[in-house]
Image: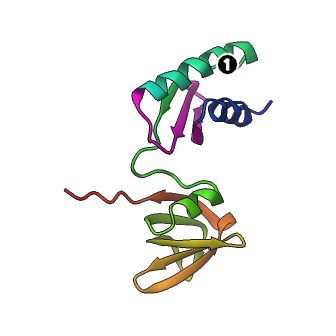
Amino acid sequence: MELQRVIEQAVDGLGYELVDFETSPRSRLLRVFIDSPNGVAIEDCTKVSNHLTRLFAVENIDYDRLEVSSPGLDRPLKKEADFVRYAGQEAQIRLRLAVNGQRNFTGRLAGVEAGRLRLECDGATHVFELDQVDKARLVPNLKF
């Protein structure tokens, strides 16, 4: 079974959302990012880490180190549902290919329709195919 699917099923089964996971071939590190509607506390990370450790032993998944954490304030946006969920918030978008000589955009997420992302930047609305988005992250809005 594919590693991502194994992790996603386990995390979903515990009531969390798998935001992302990373692997590092040299250090054999597995890094898992989880979220939930109520946020993520250290107890949540511990619960998921303990469950995944037991699951990986049963599934014979070989690794040296496992890290489980929240995605942070600059949460990555991976799935179409992420762009819908965070509509109205500011995000940084990097495209796979440049549009009018530009690959990086920062603006307000204005929704998704038919696989196309609308992003409002400096009074203009840009529309990008979701499959052309290389990376996307929320921009933290910190007010002190």
Residue lying farthest to the right in this orientation: 1
- Vertical comparison of 20 with 101: above or below: above
> Within 10 angstroms of label 1, few (less than 14), some, or many (20 or more) residues?
some
- Vertical comparison of 71 with 129: above or below: above
Q: Which residue is mark 1?
A: 56
Q: Say if the magenta span includes residue 18.
A: yes
Q: Say if the magenta span includes residue 47.
A: no
The residue sitting at 51% across, 52% down in the picture is 76
Residue lying farthest to the left in this orientation: 144
Residue 137 percent location from the top left of the image: 48, 57
Question: Which type of secondary structure does the marked residue at label 1 adopt?
Answer: helix
Circle count: 1
The one nearer the camera, 96 or 83, is 83
Q: Look at the image and tell me in which quarter the N terminus lies.
A: top right
- Vertical comparison of 135 with 68: above or below: below
Residue 129 percent location from the top left of the image: 67, 72
Q: Which of the 4 quarters of the picture holds residue 138?
A: bottom left
The residue sitting at 60% across, 40% down in the picture is 18
Q: Which of the 4 quarters of the picture holds residue 32?
A: top right
102 with respect to 90 (left or right): right
115 with respect to 94 (left or right): right
**Amino acid identity at mark 1:** Phe
Residue 6 in sight from this viewpoint: yes
The one nearer the camera, 132 or 42, is 42
Colour convention of the picture = rainbow
Q: Which of the 4 quarters of the picture holds residue 97?
A: bottom right
Residue 75 percent location from the top left of the image: 47, 50
Residue 65 in sight from this viewpoint: no
The residue sitting at 67% across, 18% down in the picture is 56
Q: Which stretch appears magenta? A: 16-42
The one nearer the camera, 8 or 67, is 8
Q: Look at the image and tell me in which quarter the C terminus lies.
A: bottom left
